[in-house]
């Protein structure tokens, strides 16, 4: 499904996507296009993109093609989703300790929609950190 979504092929394109959007949240999936986790996340992003298009725009970035942001945003996982609003990185408290990004593939479409809605509502009110509607601290069983 990722071939239906907009891919950004350079650091300049990523910067422009973040800078130009005034009214919607920019959701960017950084990762490897052929990684199974990224493909699962891409499918979820594609399936919710039509439902959230009024307040969110989504892009895909292959970090092997555009390595510019790997150090800046500490993108070391095979699949990472980050949110921006009016040229500002919006952090989200997921209960995992990493408030910068979602770094696992989400397969539940409604969960992702809920997160995007929370990010949009918080960001439009000027908040730089929003709290997820669900706690993901117990997602991994150790």
Image: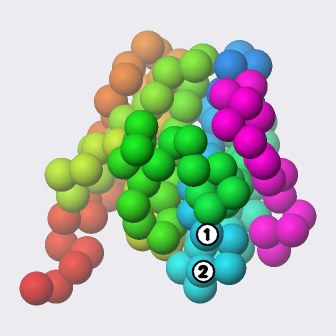
Q: Is residue 49 magenta?
A: no
Q: Could one spot residue 41 in this view of the protein? A: yes
Q: Nearer the viewer, residue 140 or 30?
A: 30
- Mark 2 secondary-structure assignment: loop
> Pointer 1: residues within 10 angstroms few (<14), some, or many (20+)?
many
Q: Is residue 5 above or below residue 108?
A: above
In this view, the residue farthest toward the left is 142
Q: Which residue is mark 2?
A: 35
Mark 1 → mark 2, Cα distance in angstroms: 5 Å
In this view, the residue farthest toward the right is 4
Q: How many numbered discs sit on the rendered protein?
A: 2
Q: Nearer the viewer, residue 76 or 99?
A: 76
Find out whether the residues at labels 1 and 2 contact each other: C-beta distance under 8 Å: yes
Whole-percent x and y of residue 85?
57, 25
The span picked out in magenta is 1-16
**Which residue: 41% across, 66% down?**
77
Q: Could one spot residue 117 in this view of the protein? A: no
Q: Which residue is mark 1?
A: 32
**Which residue: 56% across, 42% down?**
68
- Mark 1 secondary-structure assignment: loop
């Amino acid at each position: 499904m990722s071939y239906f979504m907009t891919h950004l092929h350079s650091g300049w394109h990523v910067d422009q996507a973040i800078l130009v959007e005034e009214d919607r949240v920019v959701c960017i999936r950084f990762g490897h296009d052929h990684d199974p986790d990224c493909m699962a996340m891409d499918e979820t992003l594609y399936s919710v993109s039509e439902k959230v298009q009024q307040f969110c725009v989504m892009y895909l970035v292959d970090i092997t093609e555009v390595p510019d942001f790997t150090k800046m945003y500490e993108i070391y996982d095979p699949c990472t989703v980050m949110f921006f609003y009016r040229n500002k990185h919006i952090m989200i408290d997921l209960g995992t300790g990493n408030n910068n990004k979602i770094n696992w593939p989400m397969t539940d479409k409604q969960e992702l929609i809920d997160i995007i809605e929370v990010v949009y509502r918080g960001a439009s009110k000027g908040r730089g950190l929003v709290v997820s509607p669900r706690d993901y601290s117990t997602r991994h069983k150790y």
